Amino acid sequence: MICVICGKKFEACRSTQKYCSAACRRYANRHGGNDHAEFPVPVEKPVIREFRCLKCGKIVYVTELEDCRLKFCSQRCEKAYWKHSKRVCPLTVYREFCCRKCGKPVVVTDPKDRRTVFCSQYCRTHCFDPQKKYSRKKV
């Protein structure tokens, strides 16, 4: 493997190892080298959603379901944004994803819109229990 910080070739002890030494790992943690936006998108993993970082403007491709990032590429950018948020002019939010239930492509441009998996409330409720009737009771 090749270290993402210094570029040296090394033999990884684990399949998730990215750095050749503890010094490179500490440097990445302190200086924002841990953001996933700089790495190329793997071919075998589909992109779940993509967005532009509000602080630095990088395009971030999210390929793992456990990754909950929506606005920032790294913790460093998020902390810097909120520390100086009054002076920063926010970029427009643009997220794309496909609905898990119906497969419809969804584009989100409103920064307050939190949708990440489903296109609507209908798809969300019917995805988990399609047999149950979701209707309002008339009193």
Image: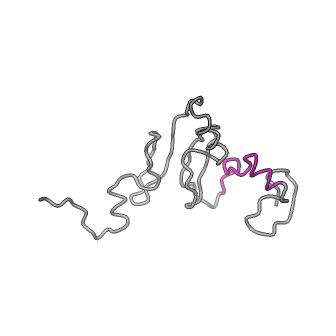
Placement of the N terminus among the 4 image quadrants: bottom right
The x, y position of residue 31, in whole percent, is: 76, 46
Looking at the picture, how far across and down is residue 38, in whole percent? 70, 47
Q: Which residue is at 57% across, 54% downward? A: 47
Q: Nearer the viewer, residue 56 or 108?
A: 56
Residue shown at the point (85%, 59%) measured from the top left: 21
Residue 48 lies left or right of residue 25; in this view the side is left
What range is drawn magenta here? Answer: 24-42
Who is closer to the viewer here, 21 or 62?
21
Residue visible at 65% across and 39% down in the picture:
80
Taking depth in this image into account, of 15 and 90 the one nearest to the observer is 90
- Point out the residue furthest to the left here: 139
Which color mode does the image show?
A: one colour
Residue drawn at x 57%, y 61% as measured from the top left: 66
Vertical order, 91 against 33 (above or below):
above
Residue toward you, 117 or 27:
27
Residue 34 coordinates in the image, percent (x, y): 71, 52
Asked whether 28 falls inside the magenta stretch, the response is yes
Q: Quadrant of residue 15?
A: bottom right
Callout count: 0
Q: Name the spot of residue 12 as percent of width and height, x first.
A: 81, 66
Q: Residue furthest front?
A: 83
Whether residue 90 appears in magenta in the rendering, the answer is no
Quadrant housing the C terminus: bottom left
